[in-house]
Image (spheres, helix red, strand yellow):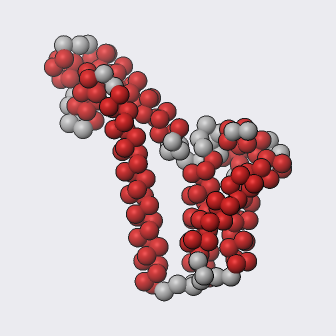
């Protein structure tokens, strides 16, 4: 069963779907929580946080986009809930708080780099004219009218090319777990 089916079953409040999600991703979520909490808290606190992740998934299942993979959603929830658990328990020093903030920033930077890599991959597959239209419009901030004149095509062709490329990028990013937030 794929993620889309599991998410739809969660939305339909099928408790067996939650059990299947826990079976599939429980170890992964546990590892993320354990790596963040480490030995600063008791093993029971780690298990409680993991349970909280799946409880939150169940409660908010109606908000999850079943067109996106479930794993990135769970990773984000696990990471945030583990860090919140540490903050609530005040089990770290201000220096460690700064490390957590730095980890968040680095994680966001890695995600941006991965998204850029995906975009570059899509652009590399485009025909030369479409790639140049996209780059001139989004990177060089040239106007549609100027791009159309440079390549001797209609403005509507430039707009349609941009529209198609945006849709392709959106699909590719969502397929890789990026896009609309759940």
Residue at x 68% of width, y 73% of height: 46
Q: Position of residue 140 (x, y in %)?
A: 20, 36
Q: Position of residue 29 (x, y in %)?
A: 64, 61
Q: Is residue 43 left or right of residue 138?
A: right
Residue at x 22% of width, y 18% of height: 148
Q: Between residues 31 and 19, which one lies in front from this camera angle?
A: 31
Q: Between residues 118 and 171, which one lies in front from this camera angle?
A: 118
Quadrant housing residue 126: top left
Q: Is residue 142 left or right of residue 52?
A: left
Residue at x 62% of width, y 41% of height: 65
Quick one: which residue is furthest to the left in this view? 150
Q: Position of residue 16 (x, y in %)?
A: 83, 48
Q: Is residue 11 visible?
A: no
Count the marks: how many?
A: 0
Q: Is residue 62 visible?
A: yes
Q: Between residues 116 and 133, which one lies in front from this camera angle?
A: 116
Decide: is 117 above or below 53.
Answer: above
Quick one: which residue is furthest to the right in this view? 15
Q: Position of residue 17 (x, y in %)?
A: 79, 47
Q: Which part of the image, by quadrant, shows the N terminus?
A: top right
């Amino acid at each position: 069963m794929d993620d889309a089916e599991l998410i739809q079953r969660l939305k339909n409040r099928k408790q067996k779907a939650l059990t299947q999600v826990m079976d599939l991703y429980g170890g992964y979520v546990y590892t993320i929580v354990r790596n963040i909490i480490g030995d600063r808290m008791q093993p029971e606190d780690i298990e409680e946080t993991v349970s909280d992740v799946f409880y939150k998934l169940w409660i908010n299942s109606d908000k999850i986009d079943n067109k996106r993979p479930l794993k990135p959603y769970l990773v984000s929830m696990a990471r945030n809930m583990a860090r919140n658990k540490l903050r609530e328990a005040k089990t770290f020093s201000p220096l460690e708080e700064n490390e957590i903030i730095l980890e968040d920033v680095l994680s966001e930077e890695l995600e941006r780099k991965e998204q850029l890599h995906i975009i570059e991959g899509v652009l590399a597959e485009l025909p030369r004219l479409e790639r140049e239209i996209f780059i001139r419009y989004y990177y060089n901030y040239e106007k549609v009218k100027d791009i159309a004149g440079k390549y001797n095509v209609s403005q509507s062709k430039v707009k349609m090319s941009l529209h198609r490329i945006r849709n392709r990028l959106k699909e590719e990013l969502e397929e890789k777990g990026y896009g609309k937030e759940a």
